[in-house]
Image (spheres, grey):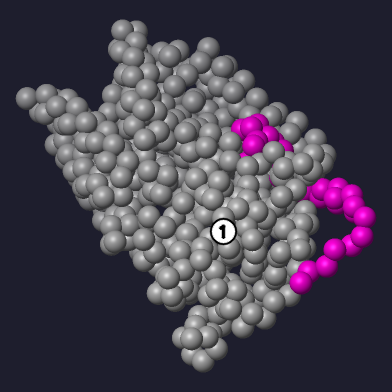
């Protein structure tokens, strides 16, 4: 009877998880998805807990309480910290898979050697490698996103890096093959530990050469790995619920990775082994040196007020400055004056997929005003003012023709086609890719230097206070 | 061997369903999608419960308890933050 409940619960939970993802196709139904997910998870947990082989309950209870104690504060982080939180949860997912794999292996090694069939040992090796590399890789990514002091933000590269990385992974896989052949030899336990250590090392090495602009892709890839680790656990434990839920997570990570790579015109291998943003040859100085034209806040406010349509292009700079609420105030001031305001969202703007959308939604900007790159670009020539807000590489026209730059071929938002461009920028430094942005020196571009939040605050004051009526 | 065959079968089908469903997810919601799938893949909790609660040697159960704690953290924070973000998209 109780095993049957377990089977039925697994089927029910699977169906609920699929519905949870299905309802995410529209913001109107999406919250139902969370409810379905929670229900599915509760059913799965309870159905497992009541199984007869579970005889010790104290530790389970303690671990669950601990999970709530840490999980609740983690869910309340400011939305600008969501990329770090996501990376951290991938790390936890990887850790869980790696630890369960380790526990199962040593359990069977000690007591039920017959359980270690070649297939199951192979699945165990996959689970442990994927789990542990996701663990340390995601921890590194979270550290970089949180700007932890002792983790370098800029990509770190050294000669022969790819050779070393692939060597470490290759060695782990090679030892995995040895373990499949000799799962219960006297030295097999040591081989297993060596595989785990190599996987932990590989995760760190994999993320060292990766920089901020690649984070949306890397987080998606780590998401896929975490899912695959759960799938491998499912194969080890012969548990179909683990396999389906892991496969759903894995396919989500895969699709997001593909979308992010396409939005940067790069391949997976190029992201993982290409070390974006390392020293690039400067763009060949073409003719005379162009200069920035600076605009005053008053002038910018006037330009915005006289416009009929304004497109705001947000980037990571908006997130760093926590400027989304000021953006909302500007949005209100302009729409009240009859100006049409839209937001152009580049898929890789920010540090994770969908980052800009969430920040703007937090500031209560209606999601109908958020427009994807492909839909806004045909409208850009009719746009009176393009307001670039802490975005850089995603509006750099050099992506269209400068073959020597790392952003060549990357689809961009056609800010330069607008009648006037206003660019808010913190400093005169080049963007993440280390290339000058010629958008800033175009004839119709005016710069507003300063922190995005401060500049917007001043702009809003112009509308509210005296400057403009 | 037949068991592994059927698990493999389930894996392939689930992947196809996953690809089909995820492809239709609103582009506005990629961040909450990631936290939601994250919580769902914390279904590893099922494996951790067995390892923690069954009559196994102590060392093994300690590993299980840590894994259970990690999964549970993902479940709680994943679902809660997803809901928090989706609430923002609902207020229109």
> In the displayed structure, does residue A219 sit left or right of residue A267?
left
**Quadrant location of the N terminus of chain B?**
top left
Where residue A263 sits, quadrant-wise, is top right
Where residue A30 appears, as percent x and y from the top left, is: 28, 47
> In the displayed structure, does residue A356 sit left or right of residue A413?
left
Where residue A95 appears, as percent x and y from the top left, is: 45, 42
Magenta-span inclusion, residue A288 = yes
**Residue A132 makes an appearance in the image:** no
- Between A211 and A442, the residue placed more toward the observer is A442
- As drawn, the residue found furthest toward the right would be A287
Where residue A39 appears, as percent x and y from the top left, is: 18, 43
- Between A218 and A342, the residue placed more toward the observer is A342
Q: Name the residue under label 1.
A: A383
The dominant secondary structure in magenta is: loop
Q: What stretch of residues is rendered in magenta?
A: A264-293
Residue found 34% across the figure and 10% down from its top = B5
Where residue A287 appears, as percent x and y from the top left, is: 93, 55
Residue found 66% across the figure and 46% down from its top = A210
Magenta-span inclusion, residue A283 = yes
């Amino acid at each position: 009877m109780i095993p049957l409940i377990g089977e039925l619960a697994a089927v029910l939970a699977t169906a609920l998880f699929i519905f949870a993802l299905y309802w995410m196709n529209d913001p109107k139904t999406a919250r139902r998805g969370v409810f379905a997910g929670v229900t599915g998870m509760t059913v799965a947990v309870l159905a497992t807990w009541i199984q007869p082989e579970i005889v010790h309950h104290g530790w389970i209870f303690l671990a669950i309480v601990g999970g709530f104690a840490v999980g609740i504060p983690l869910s309340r982080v400011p939305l600008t910290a969501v990329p770090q939180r996501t990376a951290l949860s991938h790390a936890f997912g990887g850790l869980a898979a790696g630890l369960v794999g380790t526990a199962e292996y040593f359990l069977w090694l000690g007591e039920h050697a017959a359980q270690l069939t070649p297939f199951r040992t192979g699945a165990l090796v996959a689970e442990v490698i994927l789990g542990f590399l996701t663990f340390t890789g995601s921890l590194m990514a979270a550290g970089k996103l949180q700007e932890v002091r002792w983790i370098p933000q800029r990509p770190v590269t050294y000669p022969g890096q790819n050779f070393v990385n692939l060597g470490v992974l290759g060695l782990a896989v090679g030892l995995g093959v040895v373990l499949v052949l000799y799962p219960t030899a006297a030295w097999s336990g040591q081989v297993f530990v060596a595989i785990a250590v190599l996987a932990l090392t590989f995760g760190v090495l994999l993320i060292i050469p990766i920089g901020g602009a690649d984070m949306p892709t890397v987080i998606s890839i780590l998401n896929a790995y975490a899912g695959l680790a759960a799938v491998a656990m499912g194969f080890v434990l012969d548990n179909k619920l683990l396999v389906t839920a892991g496969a759903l997570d894995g396919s989500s990570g895969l699709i997001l990775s593909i979308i992010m790579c396409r939005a940067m015109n790069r391949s997976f291998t190029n992201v993982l082994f290409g070390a974006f943003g390392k020293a690039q040859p400067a763009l060949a100085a073409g003719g005379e040196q162009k200069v920035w034209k600076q605009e005053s806040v008053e002038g910018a406010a006037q330009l915005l007020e006289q416009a009929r349509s304004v497109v705001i292009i947000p980037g990571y700079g908006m997130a760093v400055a926590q400027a989304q609420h000021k953006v909302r105030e500007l949005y209100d001031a302009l729409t009240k004056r009859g100006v049409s305001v839209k937001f152009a969202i580049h898929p890789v703007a920010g540090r994770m997929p969908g980052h800009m959308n969430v920040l703007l939604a937090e500031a209560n900007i209606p999601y109908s005003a958020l427009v994807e790159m492909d839909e806004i670009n045909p409208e850009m020539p009719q746009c009176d003012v393009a307001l670039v807000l802490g975005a850089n590489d995603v509006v750099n026209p050099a992506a269209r023709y400068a073959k020597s730059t790392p952003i060549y071929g990357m689809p961009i938002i056609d800010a330069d086609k607008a009648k006037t461009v206003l660019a808010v920028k913190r400093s005169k430094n080049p963007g993440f890719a280390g290339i000058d942005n010629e958008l800033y020196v175009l004839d119709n571009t005016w710069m507003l230097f300063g922190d995005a939040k401060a500049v917007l605050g001043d702009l809003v004051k112009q509308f509210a206070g005296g400057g403009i009526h | 061997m037949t068991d592994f065959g059927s698990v493999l079968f389930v894996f392939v089908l689930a992947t196809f369903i996953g690809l089909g469903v995820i492809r239709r997810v609103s582009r506005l919601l990629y961040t909450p999608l990631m936290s939601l799938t994250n919580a769902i893949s914390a279904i590893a909790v099922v494996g951790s419960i067995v390892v923690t609660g069954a009559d196994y040697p102590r060392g093994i159960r300690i590993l299980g308890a840590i894994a259970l704690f990690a999964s549970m953290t993902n479940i709680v924070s994943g679902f809660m933050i997803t809901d928090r973000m989706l609430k923002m998209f609902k207020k229109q």
